[in-house]
Every structure is written in C-alpha cells, then in structure tokens.
C-alpha cells in the first residue's frame, strides 16, 4: 500500500497560509480513429458495428500528473474512470489506472450510477490513492443517457447515498468527495440545498463547476454563484471553470473565497500554468519528452502525441501544427519533429528536468466483495449472467460506441483544428 497523503490536511495547510490548493482536473479526450487493426479486437467481441469509433484517451494519466506536479500542482485527479468497468474488468483497470510511489496526492475519480459500483471501485483502488471522487458534472449526452455525470443532479438523494455509503466504509482519513455543477445560473437555492445535503454525508470536500449542464464553455463561469455556495457550506469547496492562467486562479480565489482552484482546459494547453507561465514554456515541452521517453511503452502514442499537440499551440505556427498532427503514428517521428522545430537543445531546465521517476506500481485488486454484492442483483442485471474479467471490458468500451454522422457532429460542436478532429465542449469529458 502506498503511503497516504491526508487531503483534509492539505486544505487546512493552505488555509493557514492564506492561499488555495492548485488542482489538476480529471481529464479525458475523445479521438477518432478508422484503423481496422485498432477496431478488430472490439469487432471480435461484437462491441463495434460501425467503421468509425470514438475512443477515449486519458489526459490525466500518471505521466501527465508527473509533469504538472513539477510546475506547482498541489493535487491531481486521475482521468474519469467508469466504475462498473473498473470492477468488472482487469483489462479496463490496466488501461484506466497507473501510479507509482511519487504519485501523490492523488484522487481517483469515478463515474458511477449505483452504490455497489462506486463502493466496490473505491475499495479496490484504496491502496493506491489518497481519495475517491464521484463525477456528477459530466454533461455528455452518452453519460446522462446512462444515468452518469450531470444526470445524477436530478437525484441528489442517490448521490448522497453513494457518497454516504463509501464514507461509512472507508477510513476517516481517506478523502471522499464529489464534483457537481450549478443547477441554475440565476437562483442558487436548489444548488445550495443539494450541496448541504451532500456535505451532511461526511465528505471531505466538494468541487463545483460554475456552469449548468446545458451551458457551453463560451458562457462565462458564474463566480457570484460559486461565492454564494462557498458561504453556505463548512467543508472545503473547490472552484472550477475558465482557469487559463495563474492570475485567473488567484482572481477566482479572491472573489469566491474558495479553498482550491481546479484547472482543466487551461492546464492541458499549458501544464506550467500554476507556476505562473502564461503560455507553455519550451522547457515544459522538453520535460514532457523526457517523461515520455522514460515511460517508453507505458505511455501510448495517442496520449503522448495529444499532449504535444495541445502544449505546442502557442509555440508552433499553424502550418507546423497541422504537420505535427499529420505525422505517422510512430513516437520517434514525433520526437524528431519536436526537436527539429523547437530549440530544445538550448533549454537549460534547472527545475525538474531529467528527473528519474519510480517504476510504475504493479497494482493488484480483489474482486471478492464486488462479486458478493452483484450476486444479489436481479437476473436482469448486467452481472447476473456471471462474472468473467477476461471476457468483459464493461461499459467503458461499450458505452463509447458513438457513430458521428454530420448531424450528431454538428450537435456536439465538432470542430477541426489544424488537421485533427477535436470536439470542444461536447467531447471534453472534464466538466468545462
């Protein structure tokens, strides 16, 4: 078991120093692929019936957490993990969660729509993290259709039951938290009532994204609402939304009196945000390359490449960004391109550059309690036909089978940036 960091003490220490915790949000981004070889394993299991598949690639994975911590991040979250998949599938666990001895303070965020999945996933990940968080903010249509994310805001009693159950079954020093959105952009009575109801479950802190679920990222965050909520609860509150510079974070803290500020889109484009850089410094790109090369096969091409794409937006001309996004899917090609077009050789990194990170922890999990709980479910439940961790990837893969025709793409706000299809707002699984 990893040595634990007490999250409650982190907030107390920051308050004593009249400052706030700087937090890296749970982030996942969609990417479109049409590779037959990539889809073949899923087609074999009848999980894919269309030629185009939306896959999730983790942005808040271990290597990126290493990077942002070297630039002043106090607390990091894992990517949003589907709790049912984490419980059901060893394959999903290997894909969705990695850590090492230095990976602390760390909170694992789960998407769950029932107590059994959330409790069981929390118990399984407990040896390797400092807390768990329940996602009640994701505004994705697929998530809401299946009762995840923002859909849970309609049933605060279910959220309270999930949080309360985990709180009662975990050590008091282990953090249990939740991320929510505003229920209204004008009247905060119902949001405050909900936050107080969740506070009463004994959670360590709560994060509030300053928009409602239907509001797009172009709508400014409602800081007055965040301030009102903070004044209405006693536990620490983390504010989230529109944090692109350290000055933005400081202004959020000053106006709302929050206890922590969470950055998502901003820290994805500029991992050095909390160190005070207004845009990504070249040394940060070099540091990311060092981390990726050290990780070797532990980091996928997609994750490595996507972070290079985001963090070089301010460093490369549009033509070069297009070229970067059009490279063959080979890591050495990307490294060569970055070295050619950015002055990495002249960078003197006196901070964390060249640091050797501990090896990835070999995590082991016990499914016994999960099996016992699911055995009592009705025959119509997904676990009633038997549990086979080798045969099932869980809803993590199945729920992401989204066919994007032109109409759906337009509804999702799909856009093309420098030759690569990304989807802002609708496709960003962090709650901005």
Image (spheres, grey):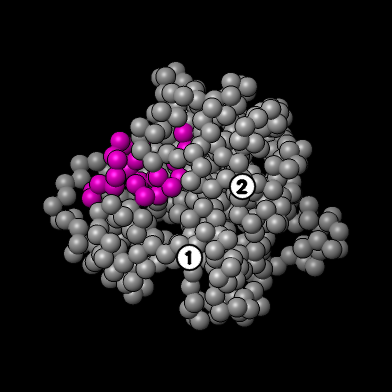
Q: Looking at the picture, does residue 126 appear above or below residue 199?
A: below
Residue 322 at what x, y percent from top left? 31, 67
Does the segment drawn in magenta span residue 378? no
Give residue 368's quadrant in the image: bottom right
Q: Which residues are magenta?
A: 261-283
Q: Which residue is mark 1?
A: 31
Q: Residues within 10 Å of mark 2 (few under 14, many from 20)?
A: few
**Residue 60 visible in the shown view:** yes
Q: Residues within 10 Å of mark 1 (few under 14, many from 20)?
A: some
Whole-Å distance between the Cαs marked 1 and 2? 23 Å
Residue 417 at what x, y percent from top left? 38, 62
Give residue 197's quadrant in the image: top right
Residue 198 at what x, y percent from top left? 69, 32
Report the residue at 23% width, 50% height from top: 282
Q: Secondary structure at mark 1?
A: strand
Does the segment drawn in magenta span residue 263? yes
Q: Secondary structure at mark 2?
A: loop
Tell me if 432 is positioned left or right of 401 in this view: left
Report the residue at 19% width, 62% height from top: 341
Badge nearest the viewer, 1 or 2: 2
Q: Which residue is mark 2?
A: 214
């Amino acid at each position: 078991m990893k040595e634990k960091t007490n999250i409650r003490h982190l907030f107390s220490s920051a308050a004593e120093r009249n400052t706030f915790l700087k937090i890296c949000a749970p982030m996942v981004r969609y990417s479109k692929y049409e590779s037959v070889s990539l889809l073949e394993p899923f087609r074999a299991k009848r999980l894919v019936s269309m030629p185009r598949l939306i896959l999730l690639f983790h942005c808040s994975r271990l290597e990126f957490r290493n990077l942002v911590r070297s630039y002043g991040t106090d607390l990091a979250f894992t990517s949003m993990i589907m709790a049912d998949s984490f419980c059901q599938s060893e394959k999903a666990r290997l894909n969705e969660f990695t850590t090492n001895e230095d990976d602390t303070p760390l909170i694992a965020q789960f998407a769950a729509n029932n107590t059994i999945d959330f409790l069981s996933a929390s118990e399984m990940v407990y040896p390797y993290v400092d807390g768990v968080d329940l996602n009640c903010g994701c505004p994705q249509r697929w998530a809401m259709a299946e009762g995840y994310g923002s859909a849970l805001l309609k049933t605060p009693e279910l959220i309270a039951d999930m949080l309360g159950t985990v709180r009662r079954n975990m050590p008091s020093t282990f953090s249990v938290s939740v991320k929510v959105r505003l229920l209204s952009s004008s009247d905060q009575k119902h949001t405050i009532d909900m936050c107080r109801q969740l506070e009463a479950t004994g959670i360590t802190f709560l994060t509030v994204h300053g928009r409602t679920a239907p509001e797009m990222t172009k709508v400014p965050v409602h800081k007055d609402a965040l301030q009102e909520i903070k004044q209405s609860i006693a536990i620490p509150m983390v504010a989230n939304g529109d944090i692109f510079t350290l000055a933005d974070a400081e202004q959020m803290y000053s106006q709302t009196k929050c206890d922590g500020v969470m950055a998502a889109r901003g820290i994805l484009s500029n991992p050095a945000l909390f160190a005070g850089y207004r845009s990504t410094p070249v040394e940060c790109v070099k540091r990311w390359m060092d981390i990726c090369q050290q990780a070797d096969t532990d980091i996928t091409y997609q994750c490595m490449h996507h972070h290079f794409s985001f963090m070089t937006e301010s460093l490369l001309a549009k033509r070069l960004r297009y070229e970067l996004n059009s490279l063959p899917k080979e890591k050495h090609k990307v490294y060569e391109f970055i070295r050619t077009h950015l002055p990495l050789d002249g960078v003197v990194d006196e901070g964390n550059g060249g640091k050797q990170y501990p090896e990835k922890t070999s995590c082991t999990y016990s499914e016994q309690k999960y099996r016992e709980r699911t055995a009592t479910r009705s025959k119509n439940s997904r676990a009633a036909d038997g549990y086979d961790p080798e045969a099932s990837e869980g809803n993590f893969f199945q729920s992401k089978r989204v066919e994007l025709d032109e109409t759906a793409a337009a509804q999702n706000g799909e856009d093309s940036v420098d030759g690569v299809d990304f989807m802002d707002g609708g496709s960003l699984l962090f709650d901005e």
